[in-house]
Image: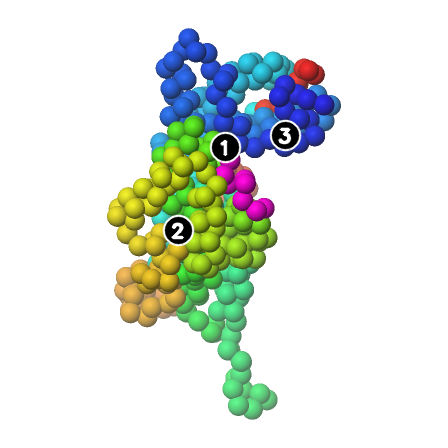
Amino acid sequence: TMAGPYDKEAMTLFDYRTDHFNDNDPQQLEKATTAPTFLYVMPLFDNKIFVEETSLVARPAISFQECKDRCFQRLAHLGIDVNYIDTEEEEEEFSYIPLGGALPLRGQRVIGLGGAAAMVHPSTGYHLCRMFMGVADAAVTIRKGLLPPPPQGNQNNAATTTTATMTLEEIAASAYHAVWSPDKIRQRNFAVFGAEFLMEQDVVGLRGFFDGFFRLPLELWAGFLAGWPGLPNNQYHETWFARMWFGLNFIVRIPPTVGLAMLASIITYSLQAGTPLLQSVTPLFGEPPSYEYDNAVQANIGDVAAKEEARRMIQESKYTKTVPVAFGLRDEEEGMEVATVTATATVAATANDD
């Protein structure tokens, strides 16, 4: 029932052990201590398991080759044999997930969603469910803005119109506001600090951090991992008081050294980054800037008069000999596929029974 030290009936998360590094190579052990990686282990069937060596969050990122080398060294130490790695039966996967970063620019008309709207969880990299929830909110807002206004007066005599209720600028602002309301930004800022703190910890600190994290009641730690309105247990993180309560429950469960490091990090982070963290856990210090439409902000609209004149002249133009094709696609290029290429694979290993 075991694959090395791993139970074949259970998923293993955050294995931050470093005993697989040789004491005769102190430089390698030092690297693994100051730039930690951990192992995910997911049993598949029979003696086959999925393994993934991961750097949770780092600046700069740890290289793929470093993660792969550590993975194979760990598996060899545990007596787990990796087979068929060069055949079609098994796969390798290389995944890079940007965390944190700036929120979308306010006042723009281009609506970004998913990763383009910084919807990746800043501390965990979880994204898919958060994106689905946020996209649904944005879609409702966009549809509402594009619908024509209801007819006024006597409907039998009312003139029909296809003009949208809102301008494109207003629609884009409303969509971003649906995705990133001030309350959602507050919750995100709390998680952004979490990622910054994790990057400060060595492997011992991370062990202590996650030991305390998973000692929390399930609804508290699961809600943090989800971290988006509408997802399970997010109600334990939606308000400043809920996040403060989470933090107090968490800090008493981690080792004192990690707790003191966290308190020091709260102070230094607030001095450097300003009010975002304080806004997320208190009702003080105001609120994050809103994405709601501001008619006074016209920086990204440009010269409206010139655009209207150009549009009118294009519509009135009689010149039709050469019709421009979108993106400069030539006749001989029509039908050519456009693809985004990614390198993906899955590392699977066969494990010797103990």
Instruction: Residue under label 1, please give it.
Output: 95
Tag 3: residue type? Met
- Numbered range of the magenta stretch: 211-218
Q: Mark 2: which amino acid?
A: Asn
Tag 3 near tag 1, CB within 8 Å: no
Secondary structure beneath disc 3? Answer: strand
Q: Position of residue 204 (x, y in %)?
A: 43, 28
Mark 1 to mark 2: distance in Å? 24 Å
Nearest to the observer: residue 327 or residue 6: 6
User: Which residue is depicted at the point 39% across and 29% down?
Assistant: 202
- The quadrant holding residue 35 is top left
Is the residue marked by circle 2 packed among few (<14), some (14-19), or many (20+) residues within 10 Å? many
Identify which amino acid the numbered label 1 is placed on. Answer: Ser
Question: Which of pointers 3 and 1 lies earlier in the amino acid sequence?
Answer: 3
Question: Secondary structure beneath disc 1?
Answer: loop
Left or right? Give the position of 271 relative to 224: left
The residue labelled by disc 2 is 189
Pick the residue in front: 265 or 111: 265
Q: Secondary structure at mark 2?
A: helix
Q: Which residue is mark 3?
A: 42
Residue 177's x, y, as percent? 43, 62
Q: Position of residue 58 (x, y in %)?
A: 39, 33
Crowdedness near tag 3: few (<14), some (14–19) or many (≥20) residues, C-alpha within 10 Å: many
At horizontal 46% and vertical 54% (from top left) the residue drawn is: 245
Q: State which tag comes first along the sequence, 1 or 2.
A: 1
- Residue 224: say if magenta: no
Q: Is residue 247 above or below residue 238?
A: above
